[in-house]
Amino acid sequence: MSKDYIVIHPCNIFSQGKADENFEIVDMYDLPNIELSSYKCMVILGFVDQEFLQEKKQIIADFLASKKIVCFFGNLVTDWLPGQQAFIAKDIRNHWDYDISIAKQHVIFDGVKEEEMTINKGVKGFFARGHHPAPADAEILLTLPEGEPVTFIDRSSTNGTIFMHAGNNLFTIGGMIPSTLKTTSRIPAQLMQWVQEEYKYLAEERINRCVK
Amino acid sequence: MRKIAVMYSGSSQHWRTYKTSEFARYIDQLIPVRQLEEANLEAFDVLIIPSQTHTGLLDQNIQKIYDFANTGKVVVTFGPQHRDWLPMHKWEFRPTNFWWWLEPNADSGLRLLETTHDLFKNYITLEDATWHQHGVYWPSEGCEVLVSTNDGGAVLYIDRVNTNGVWVNTTLDPDYHFGSYFMPATERFLRGFLPWLKKGQI
């Protein structure tokens, strides 16, 4: 069965664990050797070697140029993702500084409670501890208290779509296992649903452009 | 002053901790993990194996790390390891309690066994080494356990007996946490631990 998602995996301990069957997991250092044309979405996890990705940035740019989706989870520190700016950590002065707000209702976070993203067993900060400045036309989904975009969708920097989340991966790919008792457990399936819709949208847009 | 090299993964966590933060000045060379196999380590006195390293590339370089240690040098390992590869490695996994400090009469469970050791006498306190652990080591006889859990499992120990070099092994992962902007104690730990590696009595 062909898989829709390719996961650029850092192969560190904290990223190990069970992944959804739709994900093809590859060692990040194998990226230059992989035929990417069959994948709809490239998932890049937060422990990846970003100096290596900077060397191979053209591969990612080409993937996006072919109307595909890239989802990045983590803190961007080098220049490998088109149109994106470096991570800015939140300066913590108050106990609410890590509070997450839903900036816009969206299928990915439908039915997910803000406080359940913000708080994990009474502790804040697991979800995101900073942000990436968003491109002007980005669709901002989640923010920190001063409006900093934690999670956004960028359809303007490339011909494809970039999903940026300044935190842990929101799919089910190893790492900490989300509690099934919390509304945050809805996110992985809803994110996958969005990827499918977004891929269809990108494909239809391509057809429309061809017709024009 | 010892010359310190780091097996560097290029992740955002390592990028912050070892390359761009206040701690970069203690590091003489970052050796990209994918280039370690060819790297010449002769000039260095200390090799840090950070937490959250690529497990496959670590496996490929284990003999090289042992060879480095066996020339009388210092190897430092942070965090839980993906498999038993340290000298006389005896690891016991324990679920991480991120929330111990919220409990009534909170006790991290950590105990400082070597109060007169240079690291704890002149560089850091037990509180600076206190956030959470991912498990414990049960080092072989002759190893020096500096910090343990209250049931005797080693959280930070020094092994001078199983190779011709010195291994400073800890289940703590301050480099990951500092690089992730998570756990303020890790900043204090690194502010003492790295100067100690540089010029302290190991």
Image (cartoon, coloured by chain):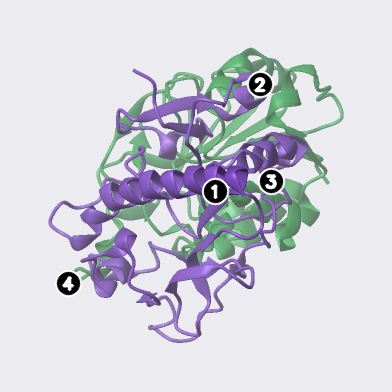
Q: Position of residue B12 (x, y in %)?
A: 62, 50
Q: Which residue is mark 3?
A: B201
Q: What type is the residue that disc 2 sits on?
A: Ile
Give the residue displayed 68% in from the left and 32% down from the top: B74
Res. A89 in view: yes
Q: Which residue in the protein does label 2 denote?
A: B65
Q: From the viewer's side, name the closer residue of A31 and B167.
A: A31
Evaluate if marks 2 and 3 touch, with contact meaning CB atoms under 8 Å apart. Answer: no
Q: Residue furthest front?
A: A212
Residue at 32% x, 39% y is: B153
Question: The residue marked by circle 3 belongs to what chain?
Answer: B
Position of B1 with respect to A125 (left or right) is right
Residue that mark 4 sits on? B104
Which residue in the structure is indicated by mark 1? A208
Distance between the Cα atoms at labels 3 and 1?
Answer: 70 Å
N-terminal of the pair, mark 3 or mark 4, is: 4
Colour displayed for chain B in the image of the structure: green
In the image, residue A63 above or below residue B182 = above
**Percent position (x, y) of residue B184?**
50, 67
Asked whether the residues under marks 3 and 4 belong to the same chain, the reply is yes
Residue appearing at x 77%, y 52% in the figure: B26
Q: Which is in the foreground here, disc 2 or disc 1?
A: 1
Residues marked 4 and 2 touching at CB (< 8 Å) = no
Task: Please tell me whether mark 4 sits on a helix, a strand or a loop.
Answer: loop
Task: Tell me which chain the residue with mark 1 is part of.
Answer: A
C-alpha gap between disc 2 and disc 1: 57 Å
Tell me, yes or no, whether dots 4 and 2 are on the same chain.
Answer: yes
